[in-house]
Amino acid sequence: MVVELPNILIRKASREDLPALVAMFAADALGGHGDTTEAEAFPDYLGAFAVIEASPDQTLYVAERGGEVVGTFQTMVTTSLTGRGSSAMIIEAVQTRADMRGQGVGAAMIEFAIAEAKGRGIRRVALTSNAVRRDAHRFYERLGFKPSHLGFKMALK
């Protein structure tokens, strides 16, 4: 599905979008994910893209403005026995290009994901945000998200 909002086009990502996406993630000093634009890392991104693209429960999106990729996010749908067998959409890896922040790109991406979830009859959307991203937390709260859980992670490598 392709949706065009005022000056913003949101569509599924393609392989051709990977260099722009990798550059956005690599430029993120707060994320701490170890992303890089080094050529030897590109096969890792290609492999991840192939897994996402093949999954019926995951979708990687890009936001374009003026023909340039200015944002990205990924959605995953998970179903559990809790909530009487309900499904949830997890919004992950939300990133707006640094020079485009504050211009409605992030809000358009989140609103798109919420509309997708509603259209699929999903009862809840969820996302996590790095604890140091105070601006992002205020942004998500403005959009109606409520902090409700404490998350934990464990690095395995």
Image (cartoon, helix red, strand yellow):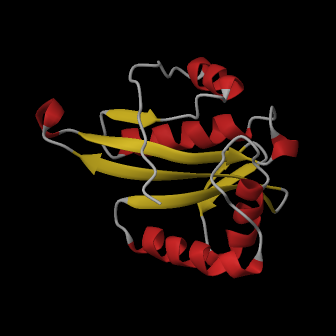
Query: Is residue 45 shown to the viewer in this render?
Result: yes
Q: Quadrant of residue 130?
A: top right
User: Relative to 9, is 50 on the left or the right?
Assistant: left
Question: Up-down: is 15 above or below 153?
Answer: below
Question: Up-down: is 118 above or below 25?
Answer: above
Which residue appears at 19% of the width and 43% of the height? 80
The x and y percentages for residue 69 are 76, 59
User: Relative to 42, is 24 on the left or the right?
Assistant: right
The x and y percentages for residue 111 are 56, 36
Q: Quadrant of residue 150?
A: top left
Q: How many tags in the picture?
A: 0
The x and y percentages for residue 112 are 55, 43
Q: Quadrant of residue 10?
A: bottom right
Find the residue positioned furthest to the right: 99
The answer to which of 90 and 109 lies nearer the viewer is 90
The answer to which of 109 and 154 lies nearer the viewer is 154
Query: Is residue 1 shown to the viewer in this render?
Result: no
Which residue appears at 60% of the width and 72% of the height? 45
Find the residue positioned furthest to the front: 157
The x and y percentages for residue 104 are 75, 35
Which residue appears at 41% of the width and 60% of the height? 58
The answer to which of 29 and 96 lies nearer the viewer is 29
